[in-house]
Amino acid sequence: MKSGDRLGPTLVMACVGVFVAYLPVTTVSVSLPAIQRGLGASTSDLSWVSDAFVLPMAALILTAGVLGDAHGRTKVFQAGLLLCALGAAVALCAGSIQVVWAGQALAGLGAAALLPATLALISHAVPDPRQRGKYIGYWATALLLALAAGPLLAGLILEHVGWRWIYLLPIPVALIAAAAAIPLVTDSRAPGKRHLDWPGQITIAVAIVALTYGVIEGGADSFTNPAVIAALVLAVLLLGAFVLVERRSDAPMLSPALFRSRGFTATALVAMVTFIGVIGSVFVLSLYFGLAQQLTTLEAGLRLLTFTALPIVLGPVIARLMHRVPVRYLLSAGLVLAAIASFSLTGVDANTSFGGIAWRFALFGLGLAAVLTPMTATAIASVPHQLAGMASAGNNAFRQIGGALGPAVLGALLTSRAAHTLPQHLSDAGVSDASARAALAAMNGDGFQAVALQDYGTQRGAALGALTNSFLDGMHLALAVSAGLLLVAALAAVTLLRSPRPEYQARPAVAQPEAAVVQPTPYTPLTCADATPPAATLRASPSLMTGAP
């Protein structure tokens, strides 16, 4: 196939890959109440359902990028699809919450392989950064389509069969795509030799797991628990060790030199903070629809569609705006809109109508539409082409770290606030002391669902009303914190992406397996029409990514 003939099939495969990678995010999120009822899981157990998927993705996404560079992007792409299919099959057959975790973890490994592989396939097929932004827009649209379709598919499935069947669809899609990639996608790899940075991989993987464990268990129990303190201290120490290891490595997973680019640094920070707020909010709102409004999964999915569909519709419009509007304005405006929407959701209660929620979700979706594509395109365009693979993998890694911390952080805030206010709500509702003590014990032990299952006799209505009010207290706090995080991300975007416009000096790629060092020069966020890398002097050096795409 000629280069132009390869582009269409490559783009389709990349879009299918990111769709398969992200479909579990929302199908599982809206099904959490059904999973909780089916397996008797606690609220902290539910946090681990989401994080069992996101943690391997965040911890291993950089490694997957290196494997693709060294052994072929198509091979890693196919391996990711097969792992997603295997993980879905394991969760489909799960008889306990622990087996669901295992299936989610395998699917997360697959997603870790798919995200850098799909972007690297596009980067290889479209080396011109001006044109690449358009195709990354298609990739982001496929990602959003997965987020939008997930709740509807899960809702339709749960209307007729059990929760486990939400895992069926990814299996045939992944297997067919893996087989189709053999004739349709030409394999590629980075020039020169690359090898895995094992010290960096081990330190960052354990650090991410320890940090997320500490946040989840601290919120569910207490941040003074010795195990929680040990986990958080270990996370801090290992993050410091990771920085030292990467600075001294001759083949780093994530070179510190990338952070000399303001564009990459800003988008990495924005990606992580944004996904803490967005994914955490989806987690909290999924529980709200199930526990406070008592909606079916399909009804919840239809409401979330207001939030997820708008970015798909507006994707082409945003792509055209990127040719005319500086990225920092798009990012900051979108994040401010999302923050306003998140804060407005603190005004909802158990009786809020669909219309009262829909306009808030639409505003949230509008903000998200202005963030996703510019965020990814800027991370890749902000460094020389030789570093595009590492930049895309790094941006995805920060995004997934935020996605892992989102349910953990906001879920912990929700649970701790609700547990704090529940006694007062029970007292105000006139619930007897014995029933109140039983409710509090259930809350501290197994979370909201356990409280709802208690036998309150004639006081059941009053007790459940108190539980709902305490849940809303926790949800409002979590959404207010989400709004604050999104504003922090907006501030980072507007301040870090405002330097004088540089000039880019292209240099021919070196034949030997040395790589490029990015010299610390100012970076201006570019419109897609000008999406060339920042000014950089490219020097042959083994200290950075060898043979980057």
Image: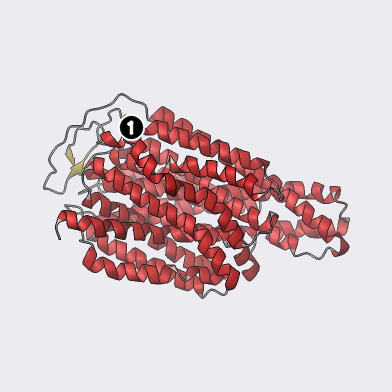
- From the viewer's perspective, tell me whether residue 151 is left or right of residue 442: left
**Element class at badge 1:** loop
* Residue 53 appears in the picture as rendered: yes
| Quarter in which the N terminus is drawn | bottom left
Locate residue 529, reporting x and y percent. 27, 35
Residue at point 30%, 65% (across, down): 78
Q: Nearer the viewer, residue 125 or 265?
A: 125
- From the viewer's perspective, tell me whether residue 251 is left or right of residue 398: left
Image vertical order of residue 298 relative to residue 468, above or below: below
Locate residue 430, reporting x and y percent. 88, 52
Three-letter residue code for mark 1? Arg
- From the viewer's perspective, tell me whether residue 199 is left or right of residue 344: left
Residue at point 65%, 67% (across, down): 37
- From the viewer's perspective, tell me whether residue 369 is left or right of residue 261: right
Residue marked by disc 1: 324
Q: Quadrant of residue 341?
A: top right
Locate residue 91, reporting x and y percent. 50, 70
Residue at point 72%, 62% (across, down): 450
